Amino acid sequence: MNVWLIAATVLLAGLLPCGWVLLRGRLREALVAFELASTVLTVVLVLLAEGFHRSSYFTVPLLLAAMSFVGSLVFIRFLGDRWL
Amino acid sequence: MIVHLLVWLGVAVELVCCVGLVAMRTAIDRLHYAGAATVVGPVLVAAAVCLEEGLFTVSGLNAIAVALLLALLGGALGVATARAIRLREHGTLEASAAERERGW
């Protein structure tokens, strides 16, 4: 275990508050929690990629950052148009 | 040593934002913490990766790309989310009479 892997493990605890709001909050608050959870997960994946010393692993957080943006936009569209 | 400091600072910022998400009451207040998490934490972690591996390495450039993506797209996402929340709560983006009186 190096500092990157320990930091990634500690940061995973940040998903608990996000999960709490996702499950207990209203729809608009859950959307904000979902956005924060994807950011935290992206940073965790960056830390893991560096911790394992595999530069190719950096593709995963790069893709997640782009794809979570698209996913959140879909939810925002549904929320704004009151389809949800 | 500086690398460790940056890593833990980045992790601490992300965790504070997660706690802030739970502590705040309204969705807009919570959105501020989500917005801060897309900029501050990833930049600190990317800086740590660049210091460890070097700026012009695959890891360093990828970490910068992730931080840039999160910062730019996160800002756009924050604005779009705030508009959707406003539409959901008030039905319009226009300021109400009470808000105009308060100078908003």
Image (cartoon, coloured by chain):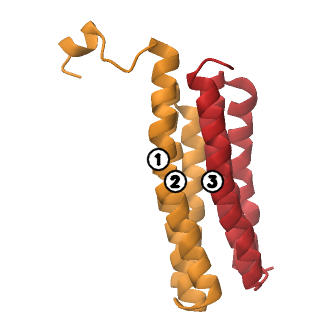
Q: CA distance from mark 2 to mark 1?
A: 5 Å
Checking the image for residue B76, the label placed there is 1
> Element type at marker 1?
helix
The amino acid sitting under disc 2 is Leu
Checking the image for residue B73, the label placed there is 2
Q: Which chain is displayed in orange in the rendered image?
A: B
Q: What residue is drawn where x is 54% and y is 59%? A: B70
User: Which callout, 3 or 1, points to the residue nearer the camera?
Assistant: 1
Residue A65 versus residue B59 in the image, above or below = above
- Discs 2, 3 touching: Cβ within 8 Å: no
Left or right of B77? Residue B103 is left
Q: What residue is drawn where x is 48% and y is 42%? A: B78
Q: Which chain is displayed in red in the rendered image?
A: A
Residue B38 versus residue A79 in the image, above or below = below
Q: CA distance from mark 3 to mark 1?
A: 14 Å
The chain carrying label 3 is A
Left or right of A83? Residue B100 is left
Checking the image for residue A39, the label placed there is 3
The chain carrying label 1 is B
> Element type at marker 3?
helix
B36 or B22, nearer to the observer: B36
Determine if marks 2 and 3 fall on one subunit.
Answer: no
